[in-house]
Image (cartoon, rainbow, N blue to C red):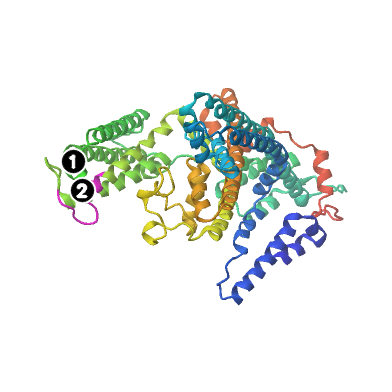
Amino acid sequence: MSPVKSYLVGWAQFRKNPWLLAYLVVLVVSLMDWIVSLSLVCHEPLRVRRPLRPFFLMQNSSMMKKTLKCIRRSLPEMASVGLLLAIHLCLFTMFGMLLFTSEKDAGQDKERLTYFRNLPEALTSLLVLLTTANNPDVMIPAYSKNRAYAIFFVAFTLIGSLFLMNLLTAIIYNQFRGYLMKSLQTSLLRRRLGTRAAYKVLSVTAAGEAHPEGVGVKPQDFLHVLQKVQLDSDHKQAIMEKVRSHGGDLLSADEFQELFDEFDKRVIKEPPPRPEYRSPFLRSAQFVFSHRYFNYLGNFMALGNLVTICAFLVLDADVPPEDRDDFVLGILNFVFILYYLLELLLKVLALGLRGYLAHPSNVFDGLLTVVLLVLEISTLAVYRFPHPGWKPEMLGLLSLWDMTRLVNMLLVFRFLRIIPSMKLMAVVASTIMDLIKNMRAFGGILVVVYYVFAIVGISLFRGVVVAPGNSSLAPANGSAPCGSFEQLEYWANNFDDFAAALVTLWNVMVVNNWQVFLDAFRRYAGPWSKVYFVLWWLVSSVIWVNLFLALILENFLHKWDRRSHLQSLTGDSEATSQMTVELLFRDVLEEPTEEELMEKLSHHPHLQLCRTTGRA
């Protein structure tokens, strides 16, 4: 693949691209490591190619490359705050070592033995306090003897956690402020360049005139090329209809660009026609059951169903599952499921099957209703109809309580149907979904970081933590100190396999009780293990989480303000919700000038616009 890329882009261009050079290096290293694996019959202690695999994912994603470039640009500012944090941590560590060394105060001695025994222990204790994970535990021994010691810990937390850590978030946000607009502006420029290049290639000269530049594109040529391009059928149909509306006239550059603007629009499909009934009664029923008030009634019933489930959860909280009488709840679930089935049939009657399936909310309701109906029929077939004292023995795969639990969970999940009916909640939900779609690059970087640290963690810590039942060397839980890894039974947090490593990294990233992990792996693997976990905390919790928070704020505030602005202009919230991100910000993006486009096209390394004939 690398020789093919170098041939296609040219060796001169290949040498100037650091990503392509890195691609070649990673490929060579992976190949050499693979040869070593074959020679050792796959029994080598370390496989170098494993942590290098995510590089191929990043190398093929322009958005991930752009994100990494912005992170690299932010590193100097983040490093300055990191240096302040390191100085703050070191100074307070020395203060603590000097403060808690007196042998006269029992509180000081306990504080020293527990958290300030030596310099590494003191540094670790305050580093964890920086994340507030061990607060107020680290303060209690000294504070219990003398309240004045609280000043030390409060001052450390105020300066470190509330000031410097939030300053780091502010710096990251300031660096990435405008990142969305810059990305959209760059994307707009590239799309305009591509459109203008296509126009120049397809353009022809006017008949009888000897102009070196093309003056238009024949609609039939455009349609012929469009037929060979793989596009979404809805967008392709919309563009074809717009081309045919021009007739046989040549398409100018502006008209050619307007055709490509269709890609910025989300095609709103027309709902299928409703069935036509001759009976006045059926026409009246169609009007009633297709009205929005009928949806409101369904939402009210879903709310009532949720309230009944909550009521029974409260009433049966102290009753063991084997002693619960599921008669009333079984009857109510049966009634609600019958109503949901009736609602489904009436909507199909009013809208038709195609019209019913045209709405995603109806598909969601219908699918859950069918699943609930199957579960209810299965329950009745196995355990018969509900009656007082309905507590039969387990038959089949699931007991009556398990069947009821499964039905209730699906009923609670079905309550999400109310979201499209509430405009404010629907706008928030759609904005969040758009954010998820437009922030896939950052999710991809998180996946890469998780993968690399998990592979490295497996190589370093596999088999280090052993549960008590598997080895006589592991201490018993009863003799373990309170709050320790053994006493809390954190044995499942290990690096014995890839899935366990991911969960362990997640628990450390959340930083709740992460001092337990630091202490346990220090004892089982050695003090050097702290470097691994502190690096993971810096990359995941400090850099990536703050970066993600900054980007969410930037995207959400921009989209919310733009959506509100456009809604005030159009007066239609539904229309603004159908816009893509590019169209949403179109009026604040700067259109490239004709001179700028032609300048960039004339210097493009892979496009030659000089032609001697009138045809491309």
> Residue 111: x and y, percent?
50, 36
The structure residue drawn at horizontal position 51% and vertical position 36%, both measured from the top left corner, is 109
> Residue 161: x and y, percent?
58, 32
Residue with the mark numbered 1: 326
> Residue 281: x and y, percent?
26, 32
Q: From which residue to which does the magenta span run?
A: 392-404
Q: Amino acid at mark 2?
A: Leu
As rendered, which of 251 and 169 lies closer to the eye?
169
Q: Please state, as top left, top right, bottom left or bottom right, where the N terminus lies in the image.
A: bottom right
Indicate the secondary structure of the residue bearing disc 1: loop
Indicate the secondary structure of the residue bearing disc 2: helix
**Residue 293 left/right relative to 493:** left
Specify the farthest residue to the left.
388
Q: Please state, as top left, top right, bottom left or bottom right, where the C terminus lies in the image.
A: bottom right
Figure check: 443 above or below 14: above
Q: Is residue 359 visible?
A: no
Crowd class of label 2 (few under 14; some 14 to 19; many from 20; radius 10 Å): many
As rendered, which of 480 and 32 lies closer to the eye?
480
Figure check: 336 above or below 56: above
The structure residue drawn at horizontal position 81% and vertical position 45%, both measured from the top left corner, is 600
As rendered, which of 192 and 446 lies closer to the eye?
446
Residue 179 lies in the magenta-colored region: no
Q: Is residue 531 visible?
A: yes
Residues at circles 2 and 1 in contact by the CB criterion of under 8 Å? yes
Residue 395 lies in the magenta-colored region: yes
> Residue 537: x and y, percent?
57, 44
Q: Which corner quadrant of the image does residue 125 belong to?
A: top right
Crowd class of label 1 (few under 14; some 14 to 19; many from 20; radius 10 Å): many
**Most prominent secondary structure in the magenta stretch?**
loop
Residue with the mark numbered 2: 400
